[in-house]
Image (cartoon, rainbow, N blue to C red):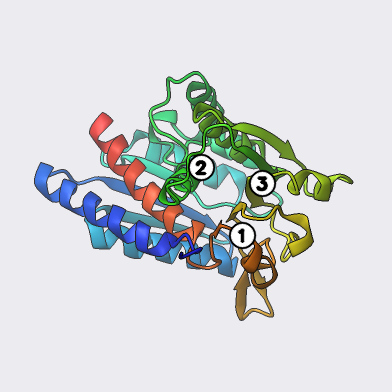
Amino acid sequence: MDKILDGKALALQIQQKIKEEIAKKHIKPSLAIILVGEDPASQLYVSKKKIACQEVGIDFHEYFMSADTTEKTLLETIDFLNKDQDTDAILVQLPLPKKFDTNKIIKAIDPKKDVDGFHPQNIQYFLKNKAYITPGLPLGILKLLEESQEDLANKYAVIVSRSKVFSQPMIKILEDRKMKVSLINPQADNLKEATLKADVLIVSCGQPFLIKEDMIKADSIIIDVGTNKIDNNYVVGDVDYSTVFPKVKFITPVPGGVGPMTVAMLLYNTVKLAKLK
């Protein structure tokens, strides 16, 4: 049995369906991405999103700003895109340089163009089943879990994360599938005690190799959201992949797991916002 949940292969299948839908319905969705600063990982993500958009037929517009860009300039750019009739979806690539108030920047995006689903209003809508879209990262993780063909009902999931923007919709998605869910901070003293109980372990904290073999339950499903650069050459996850692999039932690789699915869900949500408009 193949243990690897191949996000790259699944993402390509989803992107092909999106490409076919765009061609069949003669629509021209448009996505604008704002990137502030020169973070190598962020630049890589944006380039991958650009290539994916071009491959399926989504108009892609990129706005690169230096790290010394003012908040006023950034907000003015978002305001322009909010008002632009030709822009269906807006994404501000995170993380922003530390001088910016990330919450304030996200709040400035028109909720009807917020392709990530991170706007507070959209998160509240999602939690109340009234959302325009499902946030892309949790939706991509759900698709990967479904790819395992495991019955998720009554399974116990543990999410290791500090981010409410990520964890709130993720918890709802899992609970809607009748799963029992706990959230734990990666710095918690009882982290190992919590992760050992997880049938499904989702780790998103930006700490390379945090989760070791002695911290996971046998035959568990591991979703590694982490993307960490080592020596500027290697990309690794938050899970020590090589040591946990023999013990798990399914696992996402890094790279090639959650990352490609996040891009695929970005395309999916862009098309959905275009159709809603």
Q: Is residue 108 visible?
A: yes
Q: CA distance from mark 1 to mark 3?
A: 40 Å
Point out which mark residue 123 bears: none
Whether residue 277 can be seen here: no
* 2 or 3: tag closer to the N-terminus: 3
The mark closer to the camera, 2 or 3, is 2
Amino acid carrying mark 2 in the image: Pro
Q: CA distance from mark 2 to mark 3?
A: 25 Å
Q: Earlier in the sequence, mark 2 or mark 1?
A: 2
Quote the CA–CA distance across marks 2 and 1: 21 Å
Figure quadrant of the C terminus:
top left
Q: Residue at x 38, y 28 (%)?
A: 132
Left or right of residue 267, residue 106 in this image? right
Measured along the vertical axis of the image, is residue 166 above or below residue 172? below
Residue sitting at x 45%, y 42% = 139
Looking at the rendered structure, which numbered label has been put on residue 248? Answer: 1
Frontmost residue, 184 versus 59? 184
* Nearest to the observer: residue 66 or residue 13: 13
Which element carries disc 3, helix, strand or loop?
loop
Where residue 93 appears, as percent x and y from the top left, is 52, 52
**Tag 1 and tag 3, C-beta contact below 8 Å:** no
- The amino acid on which the numbered mark 1 sits, given as a three-letter code, is Val
The residue that disc 2 covers is 138
On screen, residue 139 versus residue 61, left or right, reads right
Marked residue nearer the N-terminal end (1 or 3): 3
Rendering quarter of residue 211? bottom right
List x then y, in percent, for residue 100: 66, 46
Instruction: Choose mark 1 or mark 3, whichever is in front.
Output: 1
